[in-house]
Image (cartoon, rainbow, N blue to C red):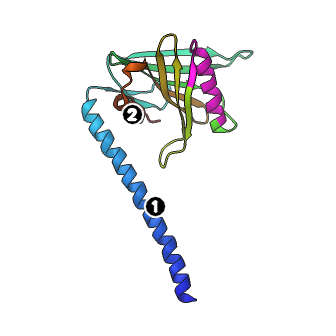
Amino acid sequence: MKNQKLIIWGSFFGGIAVALIIAGVFYLKDANMMAKLGEVYADWQTVTGQISALTARLPGELEYITQDLPIPDSVQVMRQEVYVGSDGVMSYFVSATLYPSEVTGDEEENLRQALGGIVKAVPDGVEVFSNYKAPFSGANFLEYKIYAPPTNNAYQGRLFLTSNVLYQVYTSYAEENYNDDAYTYFTNSFSF
């Protein structure tokens, strides 16, 4: 009986150790990839939110925009800040929209509703994919791609939601100009 308990506990702790080793390998692999991409994109600039707690890295001459968005049938407004950069082939956007009160409800459903609004805003836009992800470390997000066939433009990015801020991190490009390394570096440089 003692040996059987010992085997069960040993198997349990052994399984946990294997899972931790695998998670560590994936974390180190991602960290190494970002370090290599950081060398390739060393000339990209770091931006820090002025009305939200965001940071990201973008290429080129940057534009910064802020605006107040009125809420229909209300005196309240949402505040939004947007950073835009370009490498001449792809455009990069980081946006934070601050709501005047806490966003309630299911996080994934709220992100999917936000994506639905984005798809409607893109003329002839079609959702190619959307995947809700809960990473090992970091915040949950909805990764997506929208394609507009008449213009051959694609929009690919991630949506994040905190208690009262919707973050959008996305790229815009002609379908044939997609650069996975640049996209990966850009989206993984974002934090809040």
In front: 121, or 147?
A: 147
| Residue 14 place in picture, x, y as percent | 46, 70
Residue 118 lies within the magenta run:
yes
| Residue that appears at 66% across and 30% down | 101
Residue 47 lies within the magenta run:
no
Residue 70 can be seen, yes or no: yes
| Residue that appears at 68% across and 39% down | 106
| Residue that appears at 36% across and 26% down | 179
Q: Is residue 150 left or right of residue 186?
A: right
Q: Residues within 10 Å of mark 2 (few under 14, many from 20)?
A: some
Q: Secondary structure at mark 2?
A: helix
| Residue 22 place in picture, x, y as percent | 41, 57
In front: 10, or 152?
A: 152
Residue behind mark 2: 184
Q: Quadrant of residue 86?
A: top left
In front: 189, or 175?
A: 175
Residue behind mark 1: 19
Residue 169 can be seen, yes or no: no
- Magenta span covers which residues? 109-127
Q: Magenta stretch mostly in which secondary structure?
A: helix
Labels in figure, total: 2
Kind of residue indicated by mark 2: Thr
Kind of residue indicated by mark 1: Ala
Q: Quadrant of residue 60?
A: top left
